[in-house]
Structure formats: structure tokens, C-alpha cells
């Protein structure tokens, strides 16, 4: 089992993927000191808190999720997470892909367009039990039960707590500059320009670009870039690349820098993450 930051055996985490459950990542963990910095996910988050309290920082609000709570986060929504009590928090998390959630939404026939959760947290004891049973079934190698439970809990959350996501429109005049800036950072991830250089390239000022980028993506460009590097690192590790190669490819100074940022954002080190992908 991958260890995230072992404090006298109190902290542990396993982040993994079952080859029999495509489109799904799983994380089961108990964190005490670990703090997730502001980051976002390519897909959805459906997390069942089973002990302690998780404090989640979402745009405009902070949620405190205790046992019996299900945390729901949409793709590309910037958020943080940390312990809300001294003993930390324990949870079982499902990370279904956009494709998987869209498929389930189409099957239940109650949503049109791209589905999105309309609340960040719900109290749902039966839902928490279903999510933990997805983990148990997957860990036992029972793909039929795990896939059945996964689709059941996804349908439960979508039918009760989701609606079509509205078309994303920039909320400020600089929204298009923010999107262009993101494209530049994605293309030149290993050698990004400075904020001043990026603003000059886009024909705007550093402060205006910073404000527009934070408004559009929920974090400043340098924070977004670190998160994007970790997301790309995950894809490269999934493809079998070695951590040292990945660090250079995504623009980290060296493998220790990759290890530090990867562990903070994903919850486990790159080595444990790779072992989880290998089954």
C-alpha cells in the first residue's frame, strides 16, 4: 500500500486503478498532516468521508465534511483539502472520468448535455456505504460487483444532485487572454515564460492577466502550471515512463521536485502511484 506521509503509522494512502474498471481512479486514505494545495481534476470527484473531518476549500466557500458526507466536485473546479480536526480524516474516493459520468447520465436519461453536480457536499449514509463497497469489491478483484456498484452510486448522485453544466463564458473581458495564456503554458510547460513575458506576448499587462487567469481558472498561473505539470506527469507515468524522465519532460527541476509536488497534489508519491497502476 502506498504511503503518503507516514506519521507514526497514522497516515496512509492507496491511489490505484483496476484494469477491469476503465475510466476510474480510486483513492482510499487517512490523512492527518497532509494538505492538498489548490488544484483541479480532469474528471469528477465522488468522495465518501468515513472518519474525522475533511475541510474542502471551494470557490467562494469552505465545506466541512464528516462521516456520512459525500463530497462532489466537477471537472476543472479548483479546490483545496486539509484536515478539519486534529485526528485528520479518512475517506474513500472515486475519480470517474468525464466519459464515464456522461455515459451514466445518458443511461439514466434525466440529464441532457454535460452533467455537473449542483452541490459540493451531501449527507448520504447509504451513498457512503455504496462508495466504500465499490472499493472493497475492486480490491477483492470482483469487477462485476465493483462496476455495478460504481454505476449505481454515480446514477444516485447524478439523479439527486446534478444538472446540465452551463456553457462556460469568461466572466471578465480578459477571459480570452486567460484561455490564450493557458494554451501557451500547456505548449511550453517545460520552459514557460515569466508573467511579464506572457502578458507582453498576449498584448496585456501582468496584473490584468493575473486577475483574468485567477477569475477563469480559480488560481494564479504559477499554481495552475504546477497542477498541470502533475496532471501531465500522471499521464506519462500511466504510459510507463520513469519518474526521472517525467520530471524533465514536464519542467520540474529534478525528480525530488516532482516527488514533492506530485505527493502534495495526488496524495501519494510517484512510485506508489506507478505501482497502483500496475495492479
Image: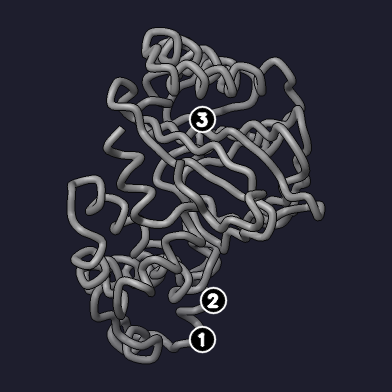
* Residue located beneath label 2 in the image: 211
Q: Is residue 8 above or below residue 204?
A: above
Q: Choose the circle earlier in sequence order: 1 or 3.
A: 3
Query: Residue 200 at what x, y percent from top left?
Result: 33, 89
Describe residue 97's horizontal placement relative to residue 163 as left or right. left
Q: Are marks 1 and 2 in contact (CB under 8 Å)?
A: yes
Report the front residue among 80 and 246: 246
**What residue lies at 38% left-to-right and 34% top-to-bottom?**
97
Give the quadrant of residue 21.
top left
Query: Residue 122 at what x, y percent from top left?
Result: 73, 30
Query: Residue 250 at what x, y percent from top left?
Result: 26, 68
Q: Choose the circle earlier in sequence order: 2 or 3.
A: 3
Residue 59 visible to an observer of this rendering = yes
Picture quarter with the C terminus: top left
Tell me the distance, in whole angstroms, between the alpha carbons under discs 1 and 2. Answer: 6 Å
* Residue located beneath label 3 in the image: 164
Q: Which mark is residue 217?
A: none
* Residue located beneath label 1 in the image: 207
Tell me the distance, in whole angstroms, between the alpha carbons under discs 2 and 3. Answer: 28 Å
Q: Is residue 135 above or below residue 262?
A: above
Which secondary structure, mark 3? Answer: strand
Describe residue 102's horizontal placement relative to residue 279 as left or right. right
**What residue lies at 50% left-to-right and 36% top-to-bottom?**
165
* Number of marks drawn: 3
Residue 167 visible to an observer of this rendering = no
Pointer 2 local density, CA inside 10 Å: few below 14, some 14–19, many at least 20: some
Which secondary structure, mark 1? Answer: helix
**What residue lies at 57% left-to-right and 47% top-to-bottom?**
12
Q: Is residue 101 above or below residue 264?
A: above
Report the front residue among 125 and 18: 18
Tell me the distance, in whole angstroms, between the alpha carbons under discs 1 and 3. Answer: 34 Å
Q: Farthest right residue? A: 85
Amino acid at each position: 500500500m502506498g504511503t503518503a506521509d507516514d506519521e507514526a503509522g497514522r497516515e496512509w494512502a492507496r491511489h490505484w486503478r483496476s484494469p477491469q474498471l476503465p475510466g476510474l481512479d480510486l483513492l482510499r486514505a487517512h490523512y492527518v498532516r497532509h494538505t492538498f494545495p489548490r488544484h483541479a481534476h480532469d474528471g469528477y470527484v465522488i468522495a465518501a468521508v468515513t472518519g474525522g473531518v475533511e475541510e474542502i476549500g471551494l470557490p467562494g466557500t469552505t465545506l466541512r465534511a464528516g462521516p456520512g458526507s459525500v463530497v462532489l466536485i466537477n471537472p476543472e473546479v479548483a479546490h483545496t483539502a486539509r484536515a478539519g480536526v486534529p485526528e485528520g480524516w479518512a475517506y474513500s474516493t472515486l475519480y470517474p472520468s468525464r466519459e464515464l459520468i456522461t455515459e451514466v447520465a445518458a443511461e439514466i436519461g434525466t440529464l441532457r448535455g454535460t452533467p455537473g453536480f449542483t452541490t459540493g457536499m451531501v449527507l448520504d449514509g447509504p451513498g457512503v456505504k455504496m462508495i466504500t463497497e465499490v472499493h472493497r469489491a475492486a480490491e477483492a478483484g470482483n469487477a462485476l460487483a465493483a462496476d455495478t456498484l460504481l454505476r449505481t452510486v454515480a446514477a444516485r448522485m447524478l439523479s439527486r444532485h446534478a444538472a446540465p453544466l452551463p456553457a462556460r463564458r469568461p466572466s471578465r473581458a480578459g477571459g480570452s487572454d486567460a484561455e490564450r495564456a493557458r494554451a501557451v503554458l500547456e505548449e511550453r510547460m517545460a520552459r514557460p515564460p515569466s508573467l511579464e513575458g506572457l502578458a507582453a506576448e498576449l498584448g496585456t499587462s501582468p496584473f490584468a492577466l493575473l486577475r483574468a487567469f485567477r477569475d477563469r481558472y480559480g488560481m494564479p498561473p504559477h499554481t495552475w502550471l504546477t497542477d498541470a505539470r502533475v496532471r501531465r506527469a500522471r499521464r506519462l507515468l500511466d504510459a510507463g515512463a520513469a519518474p526521472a524522465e517525467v520530471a524533465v519532460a514536464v519542467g520540474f527541476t529534478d525528480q525530488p521536485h516532482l516527488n514533492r509536488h506530485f505527493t502534495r497534489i495526488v496524495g501519494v508519491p510517484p512510485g506508489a502511484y506507478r505501482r497502483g497502476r500496475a495492479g
